[in-house]
Image (spheres, rainbow, N blue to C red):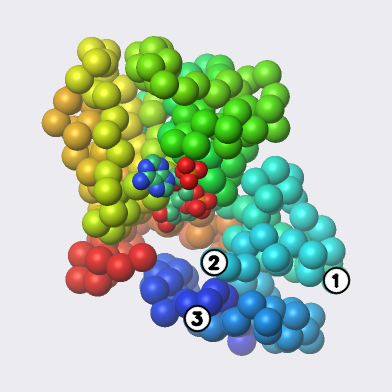
Amino acid sequence: MKKACVIGWPISHSRSPLIHNYWLQRYGIAGSYERIAVAPADLEKFFARIRNGEFVGCNITLPHKETTLVHLDRVEDEARISGSVNTIYWEGTNLVGTSTDGTGFADNVTATVKGFAWAGQKVLVLGAGGSARAVMAGLLRRKVEGVTVWNRTAQRAEALSQQFGEKVSAVAGDALIDAARIADVIVNTTSAGFSGTPQLDFPFKEISQKKIVSDIVYVPLVTPILQQAKAYGHTIVPGLGMLLYQAVLGFEKWFGRRPEVTQELHDLVARDIEEGQTL
Ligand SMILES: NC(=O)c1ccc[n+]([C@@H]2O[C@H](COP(=O)([O-])OP(=O)(O)OC[C@H]3O[C@@H](n4cnc5c(N)ncnc54)[C@H](OP(=O)(O)O)[C@@H]3O)[C@@H](O)[C@H]2O)c1
């Protein structure tokens, strides 16, 4: 029986088992997907278990997304660019790491907004953390026209724009309003507004054109910035879909079947979030 897992410290909050076990059951695959608590000091021991053939692969969550890089035989571009790994799989005898967050984000918007295609879009990214890097890497692969990045700590946005090259520019201060007016898509990658933390005060009242507004945070399911965007008539794309779409590639690599993100799966995970409201 093929075994996969998600590792993190802590790990009890992870909803990945709900997603992968739904697919295993739906497709009648004899496999398993479990949560494994791995303390930072035990990461090497966990990799010894993988290399012994115990698992067909795994997901990686905090705090191991960066420290995992040194344990791999090959790191895919998505993971190298974003500096973090969330999915590991075997390619022959090589252990490969990738980051599926950028693809998960991009596919979620495409699946949610009818007729939408990324090519030629202008995107405003709020935040300059690990997820912002993954989202930007995903966007640039999809040939967007350009990305503007804003961050509370302006130097981090500037550093990102330099890392990503000419298609990416940083904005600060009032220039955020101009960038928002020009953008087709606005995405929040900051943790502001996450599970009751102070929300981002985004200047929607200054923007008259209708936009697509997405948030990668999915607790609560409709975050404060999405509530505001909806109230101003923008099209919203909640972050839960990103969590579901980022899981597709791992399942396919481990269990040999590309799984479908169904409404039933969405509702299953949404219910779990509504009942728990934790990370
Ligand atoms: N939907 C999904 O599948 C998915 C996948 C990955 C992550 N996420 C979520 O994405 C969020 C960000 O993750 P991350 O790994 O990028 O975190 P991170 O690397 O710690 O970055 C956090 C970002 O949020 C900003 N920030 C934090 N508090 C803020 C506030 N009060 N006002 C304005 N900006 C604030 C930080 O700005 P400074 O630089 O100024 O500190 C930074 O840009 C997390 O909540 C995570 O759960 C969702």
Could you tell which of marks 1 and 3 lies nearer the N-terminus? 3
Discs 1/2, front: 2
Identify which amino acid the numbered label 1 is placed on: Thr
Q: Which residue occupies the foreground of this view, 78 or 62?
A: 62
Query: Residue tagged by mark 3?
Result: 35
In space, the residues marked 1 and 2 are separated at their CA atoms by 26 Å
Discs 1/3, front: 3
Residue 110 shows in the view: no
Query: Residue tagged by mark 1?
Result: 93
Q: Is mark 1 within 8 Å of ligand 1?
A: no
Query: Residue tagged by mark 2?
Result: 62
Q: Residue at x 53, y 77 (%)?
A: 9
Tag 2's secondary structure?
loop
- Quarter of the image for residue 276 reads bottom left
x then y, percent, for residue 158: 60, 28
x then y, percent, for residue 173: 41, 21
Numbered marks: total: 3
Q: Is mark 2 within 8 Å of ligand 1?
A: yes
In space, the residues marked 1 and 3 are separated at their CA atoms by 24 Å
